Image: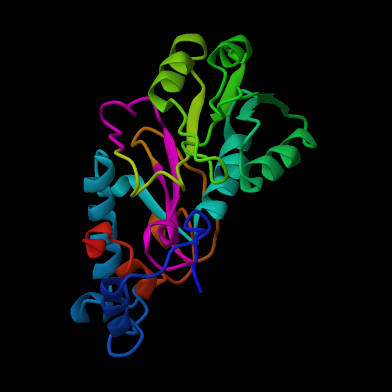
């Protein structure tokens, strides 16, 4: 069989599988248990956050909250977070993944104004149309970094700069599922205006079922899930330690 759809998912690398195996067998402890730190079962989360900080040139590991993947992260942004913002206008592009468009539709049914910005023939967002939609009332802008069907890479730095100029209070989110691990990302330089970024490990030879949401330190994220206190109270639930062990991009080298 010849498999050509790496945009859908990638094969777990041998190094990733090797890194994960001990956390299914000897170190299967709950990472939140009292014994976890003694045996090292809590290390994968710390190592994954540090690795992503280096890869994306983020401010600090605490900027990352781990989820089941980008779909959950996107729903978090266009759910609890959007609901907490004063601005009730949301802008998305016409080429977003259903994990953006469907939550956006749900917001529209709750009284939000959702506007869709078209792309050109090349699949790249029309910055002139985005500019026309940006007003001080915009609360959230969500534009994917790279498209899963066409491969078109969006001008994230220019988009961010335009948002800051025309709607300075708006939160800028990018679904970077198809970009992380594939193209250079510098959140303290070219991508400095990105406030939130979603990703999934299985898009860059990591395991399925693990991903996350990057948020700048000044962004207040309302909890996605309640009932356990994991992820600094933002996302309750037993940590997926084996998947976290297989997340660091350095394992693919």
Task: Please state the total of marks drawn on the protein image.
Answer: 0
Quadrant in which residue 114 is drawn: top right
> Which residue is outermost to the bottom?
26
Magenta extent? 185-214
Looking at the picture, tell me which residue is in the foreground, 97 or 48: 97
Q: Is residue 105 above or below residue 208?
A: above
User: In the image, what residue occupies the spot 28% across and 51% down?
Assistant: 52
- Indicate the position of residue 108 as horizontal and vertical percent values: 76, 33
Q: Is residue 187 above or below residue 76?
A: above
Q: Residue 22: within the magenta?
A: no
User: In the image, what residue occupies the spot 50% across and 53% down?
Assistant: 7
The answer to whether residue 224 shows anywhere in this view is: no
- Indicate the position of residue 82 as horizontal and vertical percent values: 60, 35
User: In the image, what residue occupies the spot 44% across and 50% down?
Assistant: 199
- Indicate the position of residue 105 as horizontal and vertical percent values: 74, 39
Q: Is residue 199 above or below residue 244?
A: above
Q: Residue 212: within the magenta?
A: yes
């Amino acid at each position: 069989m010849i498999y050509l759809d790496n945009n859908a998912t990638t094969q777990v690398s041998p190094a990733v599988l090797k890194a994960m195996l001990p956390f299914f067998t000897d170190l299967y402890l709950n990472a939140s248990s009292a014994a976890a730190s003694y045996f090292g079962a809590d290390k994968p989360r710390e190592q994954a956050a540090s690795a992503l900080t280096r890869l994306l040139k983020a401010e600090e590991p605490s900027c990352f909250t781990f989820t089941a993947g980008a779909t959950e992260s996107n729903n978090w942004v266009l759910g609890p977070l959007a609901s907490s913002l004063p601005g009730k206008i949301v802008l998305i592009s016409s080429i977003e993944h259903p994990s953006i468009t469907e939550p956006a539709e749900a917001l529209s049914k709750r009284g939000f104004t959702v506007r869709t910005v078209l792309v050109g023939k090349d699949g790249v967002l029309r910055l002139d149309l985005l500019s026309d939609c940006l007003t001080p009332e915009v609360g959230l802008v969500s534009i994917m970094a790279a498209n899963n069907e066409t491969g078109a890479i969006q001008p994230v730095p220019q988009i961010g700069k335009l948002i800051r100029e025309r709607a300075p209070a708006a939160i800028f989110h990018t679904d970077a599922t198809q970009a992380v691990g594939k193209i250079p990302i510098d959140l303290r330089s070219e991508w400095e205006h990105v406030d939130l970024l979603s990703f999934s490990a299985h898009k860059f030879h990591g395991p399925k079922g693990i991903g996350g949401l990057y948020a700048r330190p000044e962004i207040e994220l309302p909890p996605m899930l309640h009932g356990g206190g994991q992820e600094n109270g933002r996302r309750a639930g037993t940590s997926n330690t084996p998947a976290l062990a297989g997340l660091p991009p350095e394992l693919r080298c």
